[in-house]
Amino acid sequence: MAKNRETSEKNLSLFSLQNHNLVCVKFAASFFFLALAFRLLFWDSFSLSSFVQFQKPQPQTVSPVVSSPLKAPEPSDAFHLNNQNQTSLNGSGKCNLFVGDWVSDLAEPMYTNESCRVIEPHQNCMRNGKPDLGYLYWRWNPKECELPKFNANKFLNRMRNKAMAFIGDSISRNHVQSLLCILSQVEQAVEVYHDKEYRSKIWKFPSHNFTLSVIWTPFLVKAAIYEDMNGVSSSMVQLYLDTLDSQWTEQFNTFDYVVIGGGKWFLKSAVYHENNTVAGCHYCPGKNLTDLGFDYAYRKALRLVFNFFTKDSSHNATVLFRTTTPDHFENGEWFSGGYCNRTVPFKAGDISMVDVDSIMRGVEGEEFEKAITSVGSENGVKLKLLDTTFLSLLRPDGHPGPYRQFQPFAKDKNGKVQNDCLHWCLPGPIDSWNDIVMEMLVNG
């Protein structure tokens, strides 16, 4: 035990940043924090999609676009915790599912935008005219084991008479859409609920009595958000760092499985409340408040979430904590000409996370480790790590880019178009997240 604990502490320490680095990062990043608010809400309504025929491309090994000023990562960029992030594969012992590479796979995607009717317009890259469809022909390959493809029949049978929820921001919605599309090849889901903004939804799979939900709660804690559906703010976010969002906590006891995650919304300008008073803020010039930084709030929120699972709730559920999702804007942000036009994955060693993502990742690692060491035998929760960060970092080719809009260059092939380099095309790399979920929940 002591040796394992020592190994975990050494691994986690690789992600800890010194205070002077945090100060530099906050100063350098502050100019775009407000702008990040607008790229997080690229999509908020469902629509039917039309099918686009495509030819299977030949696998490429080198990206045809010019290189960007991205530094090579240190070996510590791989996220190593204890066996909570490992599962058994085919009885062959333990394998870290989150360390590996993307390898060419010429098998057809599990679904298309014809066979799946719930793809958001902004992620419907095939319909919108994305010309480089090579991003469809890669699969995640863990370094020391073979990861089976998602088996929809097996998954639905395992989930019979069960309930599962995805809790978080728009990345969670992106993720649940992928799962819905995969499962729809066996049984079509029936939508039985949606909120006013179509952000939170519930689906039923009648023949399996399986309930699948997505709950939109981008901060996981109580928040007053003053944004319209286009992400335009009329006032600063008010975050209550000592109170979880009851929208998801009040439903938690009804779920057998939960996938929860967030992160990006904490980059927004916000005022922080604790103990019924204003404790500080993040990026609030002119407010005469102490700027505590986004990492302060993210740490507080995650600690509250993990304490809820490991101490406050006695509900017997399996919870997967999904780590932060990096974006791939190059040569600018969305508002300054940033784009993501690469057409093949990176190889491990070709890219590292930007400082903001590294800070988030460090916070996640430290708080998750504290949480799993505090789980008592009397608590029914099974808390596991769904570490999608590193494998997602390697896929700059799988975003909508300018094809978040239908035929964006139809009128002007040189027109300036807003890019989405955060969310994922469907089908696309995010489908591999569900291969891993399948392995952790069903096969593991």
Image: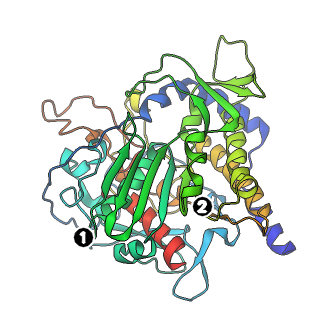
Which quarter shows the N terminus? bottom right
Residue 66: give x, y in percent of width and height: 36, 46
Between 210 and 310, the one nearer to me in the picture: 210
Q: Which residue is mark 2?
A: 319
Q: Which residue is mark 1?
A: 108
**Closer mark to the observer between disc 2 and disc 1:** 2
Residue contact between numbered discs 2 and 1, judged by CB atoms under 8 Å:
no
Chain-order first, disc 2 or disc 1: 1
Q: Secondary structure at mark 1?
A: loop
- Please state if 265 lies on the left or on the right of 370 as rendered: left
> Which residue is rendered at x = 46% and y = 63% of the image?
347
Q: Residues within 10 Å of mark 1 (few under 14, many from 20)?
A: few
> Which residue is rendered at x = 65% and y = 60% of the image?
315
Between 74 and 184, the one nearer to me in the picture: 184
Q: Residues within 10 Å of mark 2 (few under 14, many from 20)?
A: many
Mark 2 residue type: Val
Q: Secondary structure at mark 2?
A: strand
Residue 376: give x, y in percent of width and height: 79, 65
Residue 411: give x, y in percent of width and height: 12, 30
Mark 1 residue type: Glu
As drawn, 416 above or below 364: above
Q: Is any atom of residue 293 visible in this view?
A: yes
Q: Is any atom of residue 429 visible in this view?
A: no
> Which residue is rendered at x = 67% and y = 48% of the image?
305
> Which residue is rendered at x = 59% and y = 44% of the image?
357
Which quarter shows the C terminus? bottom right
Q: Residue furthest right?
A: 2
- Marks 2 and 1 sit apart, C-alpha to C-alpha, by 31 Å
Q: Which mark is residue 313?
A: none
